[in-house]
Image (cartoon, rainbow, N blue to C red):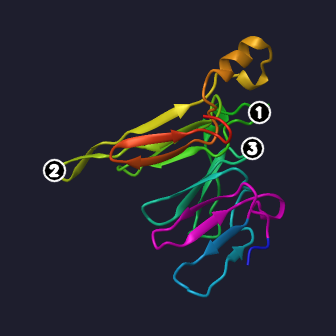
Amino acid sequence: MVLTDVWCSSSALTPDGSLFQTGGFNDGERVVRVFDKSCGKCDWKEIPYGLVNRRWYATNHVLPDGRQIVIGGRRQFNYEFYLKTMSSDKAYSLAFLVQTNDPIIENNLYPFVFLNTDGNLFIFANYPSTRSGVLLPMRVVQGKVVVVEVLICGGTPQGCSKKSGSETKSEISEKPYPKYPKFWISKNRIIRIFGFGFG
């Protein structure tokens, strides 16, 4: 049973289909929640202090070894791994999140993460303002992936949310609202649907 606050937590599916959800608000900020799909009558299992740091607005991504990397979150410029391999596991600083942070509006929450075929991660943060991204279909030649591309869309100019006046309002109102887009890929096409009430 889920007893802690999951508001703005993050999650990812493991290779076996289990769902790991991490962080949240208040009493849920360092909790890991697991729903094991292999058990037909199972319930959520909560692991208090399963995370080294509090995670609120973080991003999870599954790694080739089955662990998850948990990146960022509100005022968290670091990453950590779950499952922990030893009790001394820690969080690791990620300077990129500091460099893309605007402390007044905190606009690099839920960083975008893509696993490359060479095992490296491609990470971009919501800077200057909320963007979206999708991993495009990979090009395979003679059984080898030869091209991996990430399409990044949207965003607004830096400082846009702090400005006022008709110039800024006009500029924003003429563009599709960039927040909360969704993607579906079918027959090499991408459809981008804009935020609620816009687009």
Q: Position of residue 34 (x, y in %)?
A: 63, 73
Q: Position of residue 151 (x, y in %)?
A: 44, 36
| Left or right relative to 149: residue 27 | right
| Left or right relative to 82: residue 102 | right
Mark 2 and mark 3 lie on one chain; the one further toward the N terminus is 3
Mark 1 residue type: Ile
Q: Is residue 120 depicted above or below 169 in this figure?
A: below
Residue that badge 2 annotates: 142
User: Residue 183 shows which numbered tag?
Assistant: none
In-front residue for pair 181/158: 181
Residue shown at the point (62%, 42%) measured from the top left:
180
In-front residue for pair 31/138: 138
Mark 3 residue type: Arg
In-front residue for pair 2/118: 2
Q: Residues within 10 Å of mark 3 (few under 14, many from 20)?
A: some
Residue shown at the point (79%, 57%) measured from the top left:
25
Residue that badge 3 annotates: 75
Q: Is residue 123 depicted above or below 162 in this figure?
A: below
Between the residue at mark 2 and the residue at mark 3, the CA separation in whole angstroms equals: 45 Å
Image quadrant occupied by the N terminus: bottom right
Residue that badge 1 annotates: 105
Between the residue at mark 1 and the residue at mark 3, the CA separation in whole angstroms equals: 11 Å
